[in-house]
Image (cartoon, rainbow, N blue to C red):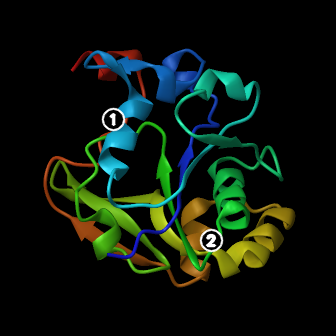
Amino acid sequence: MHKPPAVILAGGKATRMGGGDKPLMHWRGRPLIEHVLEGLAGQVGDIAINAGGDPARYAGYGEVVADGLPDCGPLSGLLTALEWAEGNEVLVVAGDTVCLPHDLVQRLTAPSYAASLVDGEWRAHPTLGLWQTSLAPHLRAYLESGERRVMGWAKQVGAKEVRFDGDIFRNFNTPKDLES
């Protein structure tokens, strides 16, 4: 099985959560990042964590890489992933997305992103995708032009939506979400 490198996006401000590092917040007795790493186990090769600030807070979870082009939202992290990864592809996953399917990498083909059924509607998760590293210059130009829309860039590069059924891709936006 092909095992691309992966980057966990952990650089968000978590404003709806009251601030802090969302991947380090606890759900079911463990930090969210541990759930993400568990979901990636066996599917990917090297793993890096995209986060700014003191890298020591993620000690023990993997290599920490900061944004080379900061203040561009999640696309900053995606650009960092494309530039960090060795090889042709990199899997990118948000640091608060748990319940990853065991066949995530197997079903994605670069460029593509995941979607899941939420309340009877398909919901795209463009920060959870497999991307060609060769797209880095295109993404850098997109960001330098002032664009920040993840789906806008995904559409420009012809990314395909891959639909997954089941109770998957759970993420957390408010402190109450951590209680369930």
Residue 156, image quadrant: bottom right
Q: Residue flagged by tag 1: what amino acid is it?
A: His
Q: Is residue 87 above or below residue 19?
A: below
- The C terminus lies in quadrant: top left
Q: Tag 1, which secondary structure?
A: helix
Q: Position of residue 161 (x, y in %)?
A: 37, 74
Residue that label 1 marks: 35
**Residue occupying image coordinates x 29% and y 15%:** 29
Q: Is residue 56 above or below residue 79?
A: above
Dot 1 crowding, Cα within 10 Å, few <14, some 14–19, many 20+: many
For marks 1 and 2, the one nearer the N-term is 1
Q: Tag 2, which secondary structure?
A: helix
**Residue occupying image coordinates x 42% and y 61%:** 44
Q: Residue flagged by tag 2: what amino acid is it?
A: Trp
Residue that label 2 marks: 153
Asked whether the viewer can see residue 163, the reply is: yes
**Residue occupying image coordinates x 63% and y 50%:** 74
Dot 2 crowding, Cα within 10 Å, few <14, some 14–19, many 20+: some
Q: Position of residue 43 (x, y in %)?
A: 34, 61
Q: Is residue 138 above or below residue 55?
A: below
